[in-house]
Image (cartoon, grey):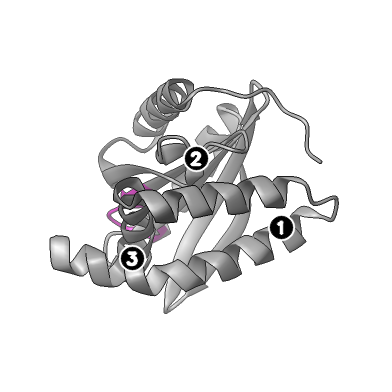
Amino acid sequence: MLDYKLYSDLDYHHIYINASKELIEVFRNEIVELHHIGSTSIEGVSVVPSVEILPVVKDLNKIDNYITQMKQIGYSLTQTSLDRNNKYLLFTAHKNDIEISVLIIERTDCDILEKKLAVRDYLRTHNEARIAYKQFKQKLNHFTRGTQDIQRAEDEYLKEIEAKAIYWYRLNN
């Protein structure tokens, strides 16, 4: 079982705001949109101390110019995918016992953006799905296996609700 300090939803929102301000300082006009995603963006579901931020940028290729600045504010580039169908950069930082993940995508990549926002908004507005997701996250928290196993299990679970979430999202947006 993972041990951590429990933060409130408001704490996570403030962490998101402060981290977003740092990102705006670094990337300036490259950022088109910023979104708080992941479990801490959904009221009552913050089970693990992590904040996920989804910046949408004009041109992903220009982000290489900012890697040094990201390192200066505590982030390291942990994953890169420049696959034609799945382009993103993932930066992570550990600040005050909280992992902050920054998944940068290009504004032309509507599939990732729609999927992330659809799941977030679906869980925010569907109480039964939100409760089930929180229970699932709590159950995952008791795993003693590596984080890759936990991530794989969470990915499989989210795939189950993505179709419903995207269908609902398209009807409501």
Q: Which residues are magenta?
A: 55-60
- Amino acid found under the numbered disc labelled 2: Val
- Amino acid found under the numbered disc labelled 1: Ile
Tell which of 21 and 172 is nearer to you: 172
- For label 3, the SS is helix
Q: Residue drawn at (85%, 50%), measured in percent from left and top?
A: 144
* Mark 1 / mark 3, whichever is N-terminal: 1
Q: Residue drawn at (34%, 32%), measured in percent from left and top?
A: 24
Q: Quadrant of the N terminus?
A: top right
* Mark 2 / mark 3, whichever is N-terminal: 2
How far is the residue under mark 2 from the one under mark 3? 17 Å
- For label 2, the SS is loop
- Amino acid found under the numbered disc labelled 3: Ala
Q: Quadrant of the C terminus?
A: bottom left
Q: Is residue 127 visible?
A: yes
Q: Residue drawn at (38%, 58%), measured in percent from left and top?
A: 119
- Taking the image as shown, residue 163 lies to the left or right of residue 76, namely left
Q: Residue drawn at (19%, 68%), measured in percent from left and top?
A: 170
Give the residue furthest to the front.
128
Crowd tier of the residue under label 3, counting other residues whose Cα lies within 10 Å: few below 14, some 14–19, many 20 or above: many
**Does residue 108 sit above or below 8 in this rendering?**
below
Q: Position of residue 105 (x, y in %)?
A: 39, 58
Q: Determine which residue is flagged by label 3.
A: 165
Q: Position of residue 150 (x, y in %)?
A: 71, 57
- Residue 59 counted in the magenta span: yes
**Does residue 15 sit above or below 133 in this rendering?**
above
How far is the residue under mark 2 from the one under mark 1? 17 Å
- For label 1, the SS is helix
Q: Position of residue 162 (x, y in %)?
A: 41, 69
Q: Which mark is residue 150?
A: 1
Q: Which mark is residue 45?
A: 2
Tell which of 153 and 101 is nearer to you: 153
